[in-house]
Image (tube, helix red, strand yellow):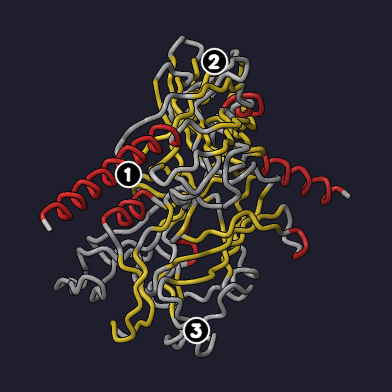
Amino acid sequence: MERKTKYWALTLGCLLMALSFTNCSDDETTLTAPMNLTYEPTMGGAIIKFTPPSNNDLLYVKASYTNSLGKDVFRTTSIYDNKIEIDGLADETKTYPIRISAVDKWGGETSATVINVQPGRSFINVIKDNLKISPICGGLAVTWENPAGADAQVEDITEKSVAKVVYVVVDYTDAEGVTRTRYLSSKQKNAKANIRNMFAGNYKVTYRVEDASGNKTAQSNPSNVDVPAEQESLKYIEYNDPVHGNLKEFVWTLVPRLTTLQPAWEYKNEAIFDGIIDSNTSNTENYCGTDCDNSSVTYGSSIPWDTDQVDIVIDMHQVVSISRLKAWQRAYTYDSQPYSGATGQTSGISDDYFYYQPQNLKRFKLFGSMTLDEDGWFLIKDCDISSNSTAGTLPIYWTNPSYFGHENVYMPTNESYQYAIDGHEWELEAMTDSVRYIRVRMVENWDLSKRNLAGMSELNLYGSILVSHEELAAREAQASNVRRRK
């Protein structure tokens, strides 16, 4: 019995040793570097295809290389894929050695197989070739097409997106030799950014393009750009009267027969060009608005939003080409505050902001024309304060049916208050055609109700003054004299 036990013990030990040697032999001989390497050039990189090793211990395949910045980097792919993408190769005239290896579950790495890769033209070089810089009033318009960008109209692109961000660095030097630098960025396929607050004059402009990895193009050749002055459309002239003190002579005036927004309470249509945004020190009439609960308003039970029944039409008495506009909401109230819970002071004036309150203006449309004929009007901008071009979405949308009787409200944040104080701004894609008359059409308030509007406090227009109010008045006077002589 003892002899049989020793025999089986010896036999089992030999079998275990044989299995051990066999496993070691399998690991050493079957985990090899990927084979059959080929590649397809991409913009600033390549997709390398391979045949992975057939081994259960394979964890991933690794590509190691030195990028255009001289940094050693690597990319990996899982055991379920037979290709790996590399990037950061900004110079399409060079050939880059890429080392492909396999790594097992215990961190062991095979020797590498090298494939020499010549990348396609990098997207930053493509952008450098198609980027355009044009003068606008008081600045520069920079446009480019990013072949690796997204087609979306907004910048809300997730990390999973293949869209690649691009950075454009613009240097501009004025006639006195002062150089300033502006940094622009976008993930959009067709991108545009405006550089503002430049004095009129000639500038020497250069630029370079960078990607997220730090690769950059060479600096562009300098170009000379003449920047015209940006002018604000003149709404009134202030002067000092010996008897009445500081007075305003208005250049902008209402066109009564086309102005259909029916004012109520303290609202005044001409308040949107009086130069006063609002005050919390006294009751003011410095904003437009209407109210279906007021007996003087004949809209019925609801405001006819986005129709010619809620228009303010203005004769600017000058001819302008518009590049951007700013608008301000009503700033203060004289009663309770639905959002904060604050109440009016004993004087009836509240110290709390009225911005984004349910009945305050949220959206309007601006039209322009050179005549008062109905077929002469064109849309300049559909202006939604909640998602305007420079500020993005501002207040937080909140649905609460029991909240002060308003079903849908927007809760302000500190950031949204600051935008309201500074004024909501819209950049136009291009300068408008000549405009003498403007039409402001009310479209929505903040809770989307149809009963009341405590709306716009001020409107500013910027661009080029093509014909000043003095010159236009002189032309009209001359034309009137000619008609009288006939």
Q: Residue furthest right?
A: 486
- Front-lying residue, 440 or 205: 205
Closer to the chain start, of discs 3 and 1, is: 1
Q: What is the crowding at mark 3: few (fewer than 14 residues within 10 Å), some, or many (at least 20)?
A: some
Residue 218 tag number: 2
Mark 2, mark 3: which one is toward the viewer?
Answer: 2
Quarter-of-image position of residue 458: bottom left
- Front-lying residue, 420 or 434: 420
Q: Residue at x 60, y 36 (%)?
A: 146
Give the residue type at disc 1. Leu
Q: Residue at x 52, y 33 (%)?
A: 34
Quarter-of-image position of residue 182: top left
Cα–Cα gap, marks 2 and 3: 64 Å
Q: Is residue 61 left or right of residue 255?
A: left
Residue 19 tag number: 1
Residue 5 placed where, x, y %? 15, 54
Quadrant into which the N terminus falls:
bottom left
- Front-lying residue, 470 or 468: 468
Residue 105 placed where, x, y %? 33, 42
Q: Can see residue 197?
A: no
Circle 1 SS class: helix
Asked if residue 297 is positioned above or below residue 81 in the image, the reply reads below
Cα–Cα gap, marks 3 and 1: 96 Å
Give the residue type at disc 3. Val
Asked if residue 365 is positioned above or below residue 136 in the image, the reply reads below
Circle 3 SS class: loop
Q: Are marks 2 and 3 in contact (CB under 8 Å)?
A: no
Residue 297 tag number: 3
Q: Is residue 294 left or right of residue 462?
A: left
